[in-house]
Amino acid sequence: MSVCGVGVDLVKIPRMREVIARWDERFLRRVFTEQEIAYCRARRDPVPHFAARFAAKEAGMKALGTGLRLGVKWRELEVRRERGQAPTLVLHGRSRELGLARGGRRMLLALTHEGDYALAHALLVDDDPALAADPAPH
């Protein structure tokens, strides 16, 4: 496996709570996919989960080396988490094109939230088995 990009981001949960209270659906639908909104709203307190997903999108954009430039949109980076599995950041549209152009086929993701903060760490990686082979003798 080769790492093609790294990103990390930290979000203050109280700030996310203020943004959601002020802009509600307008903000949520601009930034998050329907599946992300449903996942977060199924939690007792959805705000830390929204904050972690926002941090994941920011970290993913940093791993791509783009930020919100080059035509990348918030909803093109989607946090998915299957029950019992680690979360992943799935790239769609322009973000996927840019990831592939950087040599990355998928985005690994670590999320956490505690107290007033949510943190995300994203790695753009290529799992091509041909690249994983180590031809150097040991």
Image (tube, rainbow, N blue to C red):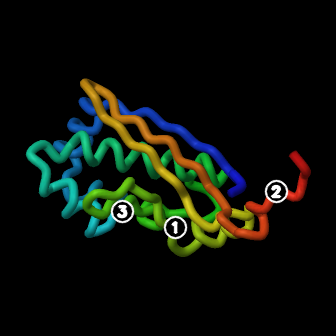
Give how far across and how far down residue 106 sits, in percent: 57, 64
| Quarter of the image where one finds residue 11 | top left
Residue 24 located left or right of residue 68:
left
What is the C-alpha distance between the residues marked 2 and 1? 28 Å
Q: Which residue is mark 3?
A: 80
Q: Within 10 Å of the Cα at label 2, are there few (<14), some (14-19), or many (20+) other Cα atoms?
A: few
The quarter holding residue 111 reads: top left
In front of the other: 89 or 41: 89
Q: Is residue 123 above or below residue 17?
A: below
Q: Quadrant of residue 1?
A: bottom right
- Work out which residue is located at the far top of the displayed protein and give it: 115
**Residue at x-position 43% and y-position 33%:** 10
Between label 2 and label 1, give the one nearer the viewer.
Answer: 2
Camera-side residue: 3 or 64?
3
Name the residue located 41 percent from the left edge and 63 percent from the top edge.
78
* Res. 91 mark: 1
Q: Counting residues from the N terminus, which is met first, the one under dot 3 or under dot 2?
A: 3
Helix, strand or loop under label 2: loop
- Look at the numbered disc 3 and give the secondary structure of its residue: strand
Label of residue 134 in the image: 2
Report the amino acid beneath label 1.
Answer: Leu
Side of 98 where 61 appears, left or right? left
Q: Quadrant of the C terminus?
A: top right
Disc 3: CA contacts within 10 A as few (<14), some (14-19) or many (>=20): some
Q: Amino acid at mark 2?
A: Asp
